Amino acid sequence: MTWWPSRKRQKTSSVPEPLVPHSDTRERAAGAIASGPRSVAVDTGGAPFAAPVLTGDGARVIQVPAEAYHPMAEVEAPPGINNLESWPEWFVGRETELARLDAALTAGGQPVVVAAVHGLGGVGKSSLAAYWAGTRPHGCAPIVWISADTPAGVERGLAGFATRLQPALAEVLTVEHLAERALQWLATHTGWLLILDNVDNPADIAPVLARARAGRILITGRLSVPWQAGAEVISLDVLATDDAQQLLTGLTTAPGQGDLNGVAQLCEALGYLPLAIQQAGAYLAHQRFTTPRAYLQMLIDQPGLTFDRAAAGTNPQRTIARIWRVTLDRITDNEPAAVELLRTLAWYASDDIPLTLCRKVADLPTVDAALGVLAAYNMITPDPAGGRLSIHRLVQAVARTPDPADPHRDPAAIERARTRATETLHASLPDRKNPATWPTWRALLPHIDALTNHSTGNESTATSIAVIRNYSGLFMLDQGLHASALAHLRRALTDREQILGEKHADTLTSRNNLANAYQAAGKVAEAIPLYERTLTDREQILGEKHPDTLTSRNNLANAYQAAGRVAEAIALYERTLTDYEQVLGEEHPDTLASRNNLASAYQAAGRVAEAIPLYERTLTDYEQILGEKHPDTLTSRNNLADAYQAAGQFADAIPLHERTYTDREQVLGEEHPDTLTSRNNLASAYQAAGQTAEAIPLFERTLTDYEQVLGEKHPDTLASRNNLADAYRAAGRVAEAIPLLERTLTDREQVLGEKHPNTLGSRNNLASAYRAAGRVAEAIPLFERTLTDFAQILGPNHPNTGVVRDNLAAAQAAQWSSQ
């Protein structure tokens, strides 16, 4: 309803004429006589105004007070007519926003100043406005608070203000006319403060902004829209961590001492949203036997019930679920696809959601329109320049929690949204082997974690979730994120066993991948049983010579070799190579890879003279079949160069390393991980040949590139730092080597674990550097600890165990000789 100037009126006066009912009796006024049924006579007696004439049975005369005829410009506001809403007793923080309101609404200048506070429902916009108006020295009077969520609400609020100005008019004028008088008063007075709270549609308050031109206006609402030129617009975010904890602590302990264990964790889970914290605090204060940790568990076990539960004595409509339901109603009216998109986004991480995960959900124009509506209502926070957006975690939690009573949380709709989120994420996964895609992978990892963590393995998307977990685990493994890789690959295997069965081909692939991750993490003892079981199952299901069976046998052999069981590894490699040659042919790429692996085992066993001919033959075949610059050919040439180096044939090794490094730079680029490996290996060959001065610059450059490309704590970066330190030590620069070795050991303990073989290698190297620096007393305990760990993990006869044993003996001898 349009309730002021645009309505057509028969009279221009703001005060309606009094109703004059007629009488059904003969009346004689002074100086006038009326005769006949229902006749009327009027004698004004010389008065300047007509006397009332009543018609109609039971009619009454309404006497309009004299103040109704006074222009509103002459009406003064009585003291004490403020109707400011109260603010929460435990109002905390918001100093920055309060200061901005001070600056905007207390400064001189324009006749009318508008400030608008917008934000997500429940973020505390109304509380901020009430607290500022009630506690800051703004000097405005009167203060007029209007709940402006609907046009009728604005009209009622203005009418209420007019009634407080002139109480005698309350029963004389309509709401519409009272609202008009309030606008006239605001237009003709200064110094007042008008708070338009919870504005849902700018059009609802447009007439107020157009006519109230001489005071201060503070607007709150969920919409982030331009209100008028020059308005100060404040985006209200969630509370700071300390303020949120202070708020929850105060609410919880208000009735007396309370259990505060878990306050920090609960605030984090609630996303530091004031209303959610107030809701939780009121509940904890009322339910004295419920602790913050117990409430947190309720959030996990019963999110829908918890978000919609109001504590005794509080407004049941002021809960997270119900407040956002109203917002979603508004959004649905404007753009139905927006709520569907919101339900889809609920399955991802709350921050930095790539827009690609939104725009694959539906056609581009529809999605962009939906994003615009969600952003306008502060349900999401867009970052167009960065190509991503954020969404509050509680919005997500509510949006993905079914509630048959809520049309926006229909269980079937939520399941459809989960399916869309899964399919979109699956389709977005790039090639994990291409370094150019790694930034995309890293941007998707938090959302992969969020989506998969919300999966139980029983939903319709379980098969796709298992695929996502498997791909993600392999990428994390490539990146050296062993713990994360193991977590995903374990779940992928569990899901596939449940869905597909223990001997399905995909299940066996998952078991193989998990074993590979264990081995990469240095947990060879856990990898071997998985490899053995996979090999047995593949032999039974596929046969002993199926390519997948041969792959399993190769992987098991590799694990045996890593565990120091080289003799067992060689036997498996030899059998596998024979089968590959029979099944695939002598020049098939898998056959060549198998021959390479056998050569590697020979080299590990000290049988370098047998390894070199295999490497040479493999390289020749790769060059003929794949070409001289194919990545697999370059890997083969690198391995042959390494064997030459192990045999002391530096004149043969160095040219091969140089050629491989040059080709990889040309084919793969200067910063490709394989190129960095080649540069590292060339530097190692220089060092082994006594050309340490040439080795060190290569090691330094390689370390810098590894840190930039892979990060400072990637396993390959740590190996590079270790190699540079070893070169410094070989050059007599022990003082420079020791800090690098100490840092590498610390990082390997954190990244790989204290008993990973590479960590033990770092400890051995640091002990050796201490010994070289004359710090034998510090070296010996490190050697002793490393020897014990190697013996436990790899066995007392493993070559690495023997190396450490010899180093310890040498250090002890040096200590004895110095005494």
Image (spheres, rainbow, N blue to C red):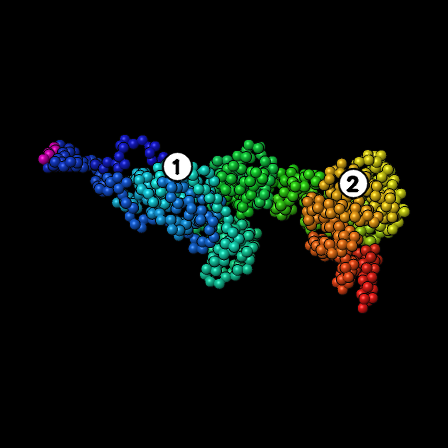
Q: What residue type is disc 1 on? A: Ala
Judging depth in this view, the residue of 542 and 766 nearest the camera is 766
Residue at 75%, 63% in the rendered image: 778
Q: Is residue 528 above or below residue 227?
A: below
Q: Secondary structure at mark 2?
A: helix
Residue at 35%, 37% in the rendered image: 211
Say which quarter of the image contains residue 416: top right
State the extent of the magenta-drawn residues as a range. Answer: 31-35
Residue at 76%, 52% in the rendered image: 728
Q: How many marks?
A: 2
Residue at 73%, 47% in the rendered image: 700
Residue furthest to the bottom in view is: 819
> Where is the N terminus found, in terms of image quarters?
top left
Q: Is residue 706 above or below residue 245?
A: above
Q: Bin the neighbour count of mark 2 within 10 Å (Cα to Cα): few under 14, some 14-19, many 20 and up.
A: many
Q: Bin the neighbour count of mark 1 within 10 Å (Cα to Cα): few under 14, some 14-19, many 20 and up.
A: few
Relative image position of residue 50 (x, y in whole percent)? 17, 35
Q: Is residue 250 visible?
A: yes
Residue position for label 1: 206
Judging depth in this view, the residue of 279 and 263 nearest the camera is 263
Relative image position of residue 773 (x, y in whole percent)? 77, 59
Residue position for label 2: 661
Q: Secondary structure at mark 1?
A: helix
Estimate the spatial distance between the alpha carbons at disc 2 and disc 1, rounded to whole Å: 71 Å
**785 in magenta:** no
Say which quarter of the image contains residue 12: top left
The tag earlier along the polypeptide, 2 or 1, is 1
Q: What residue type is disc 2 on? A: Tyr
Is most of the magenta stretch helix, strand or loop?
loop
